[in-house]
Image: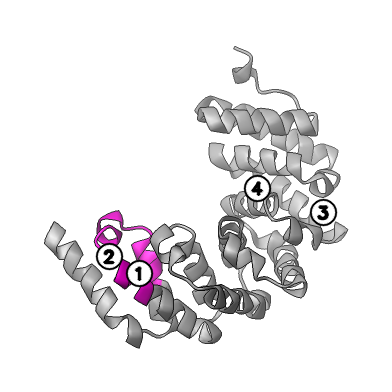
Amino acid sequence: MSPPGWAGLAEAAERTAREMNPQVVANTLNALSKLEAAAATVSPTGWAGLAGAAERTASQMNEQNVANTLNALSKLEAAAAAVSPTGWAGLAEAAERTAREMNPQEVANMLNALSKLEAAAAAVSPPGWTGLAEAAERTAREMNPQVVANTLNALSKLEAAAAAVSPTGWAGLAGAAERTSSQMNEQGVSNTLHALGVLSAAAAELSPSARKHLEAAAEREAPNMTSAGRRMTLRGCEKLKLRTPSAFLE
């Protein structure tokens, strides 16, 4: 795609924003969050129009639309900056409304986005956090390795959501971490261990078997970790009193 081609597609997104339905808004923002060349050509007026489209359609969004929209906005600073306080309130309400229908990936995307979008998180009500926490509890058994890591990582940054998770919910998430640890990549391992080190209620639910599995995962992935991942893993191991990976001792 040529630079003028990206500019033309960005202009088309700007031009059609007012006619977009909820799914088109979500798909457009999701795509722009992954296409730097296109996003770089969207004008301030264009971002305002797309933000306005998200605000206008929030009340009609389904769970996938809401999760994708907020996830995209968490990566598109110019778009997020154009959302009004009323718009964030509408998107937060949409997240609360659709929480019961979310699948594991949508739960992770939603919580991850809220952990990065302070204005949206501030608009979520106490019952809304309870609903999102219950969604994480409900889907824990079906989560894949990346979703487990992302969910725990988000909860470690969202006090209101973490406070709404029940002991049974933490047990389910701890079990999910154990079940998927053998398939986690280096980022998943570091995010999971760091999150569990922050989330004492989750750490308390780790079985001896879970601790052994997490130690094995850290040992396996430690050589592949970035410096930031190593720091997170080391901190998590210290907090959880797990064996330090041998690669960190060399």
Q: Quadrant of the C terminus?
A: top right
Three-letter amino acid code at the position of disc 1: Trp
Q: Nearer the viewer, mark 4 or mark 2?
A: 2
Residue that carries the numbered disc 4 in the rendered image: 180
Task: Give percent across and percent down for residue 236.
Answer: 71, 34
Q: CA distance from mark 2 to mark 3?
A: 45 Å
Tell me the element at label 3.
helix
Residue stretch in magenta: 27-49
Residue 149 visible in the shown view: yes
**Main secondary structure found in the magenta portion:** helix
Image coordinates of residue 99 in percent, x first then y, are 66, 74
Residue 40 is a magenta residue: yes
Query: What label does residue 47 carry, if any?
Result: 1
Please state which amino acid type lies under the numbered disc 4. Answer: Thr
Residue position for label 3:
171
**Marks 3 and 4, how far apart in space?**
14 Å
Residue 20 percent location from the top left of the image: 36, 84
Q: Is residue 66 left or right of residue 203?
A: left
Res 207 → quadrant: top right
